Image (cartoon, rainbow, N blue to C red):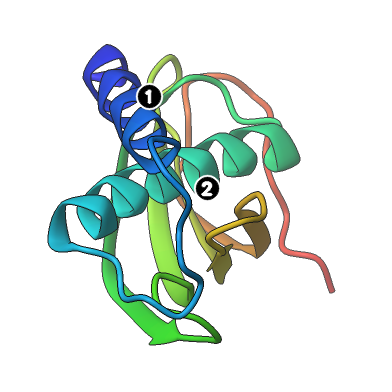
């Protein structure tokens, strides 16, 4: 799965770099789809890095609210996500905003909400006060 997402992201970046992009021109459906896949992967990686998560087995979210900002193809995605770690089986909930921009790196502002299911190891995350 990770290799497939990475291959699609690389293909999208290659397509995007084939010619100059007019900042005011709307992006096509294929490019928007590839950008969404790449943004999801980037935001998931940033969650792993920021919260010290082990390898992620799955991310579930039924609360995603993409809001267009600025130029076509740029948006802020407000989300609540339940992340399952592969090794321990721990499920934790995060809430935040993933900021997708056409000419800048995708950024993430997220916070830990709660642990939904304890993992097999003894490390516990506590909601900040």
> Gap in Å between the C-alphas at discs 1 and 2?
16 Å
Q: Is mark 2 on a helix, strand or loop?
A: helix
Residue 83 visible to an observer of this rendering? no
Residue 25, quarter of picture: bottom left
Taking the spot 26% from the left edge, 28% from the top edge, the residue there is 8
Neighbour tally class for label 1: few under 14, some 14-19, many 20 plus, Cα within 10 Å: some
Q: Choose the circle earlier in sequence order: 1 or 2.
A: 1
Residue 56 or 30: which is nearer the viewer? 30
Residue identifier under label 1:
10
| Residue 61 location (% of width, % of height) | 29, 62
Residue 111, quarter of picture: bottom right
| Residue 124 location (% of width, % of height) | 67, 39
Residue 63 visible to an observer of this rendering? yes
Residue 101 or 119: which is nearer the viewer? 101
Pair 1/2: label in front: 1
Contact, mark 1 vs mark 2 (Cβ under 8 Å): no
Looking at the picture, does residue 77 appear above or below residue 88? below
Q: Which residue lies furthest to the left in this view?
A: 29
Q: Is residue 26 left or right of residue 75?
A: left
Total marks shown come to 2
Neighbour tally class for label 2: few under 14, some 14-19, many 20 plus, Cα within 10 Å: many
Taking the spot 35% from the left edge, 82% from the top edge, the residue there is 65
Looking at the picture, does residue 38 appear above or below residue 88? below
Residue identifier under label 2:
43
Q: Is mark 1 on a helix, strand or loop?
A: helix
Residue 99, quarter of picture: bottom right
């Amino acid at each position: 799965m990770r290799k497939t997402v990475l291959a699609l992201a690389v293909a999208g970046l290659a397509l995007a770099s084939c010619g100059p992009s007019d900042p005011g021109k709307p992006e096509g459906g294929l490019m928007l789809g590839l950008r969404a896949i790449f943004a999801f992967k980037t935001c998931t990686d940033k969650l792993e890095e920021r919260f010290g998560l082990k390898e992620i087995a799955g991310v579930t979210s039924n609360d995603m609210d993409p809001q267009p900002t600025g130029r076509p193809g740029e948006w802020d995605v407000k989300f609540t996500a339940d992340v399952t770690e592969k090794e321990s089986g721990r499920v934790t909930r995060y809430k935040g905003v993933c900021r997708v921009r056409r000419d800048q790196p995708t950024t993430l502002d997220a916070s830990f909400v709660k642990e939904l299911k304890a993992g097999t190891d003894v490390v516990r995350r506590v909601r900040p006060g």
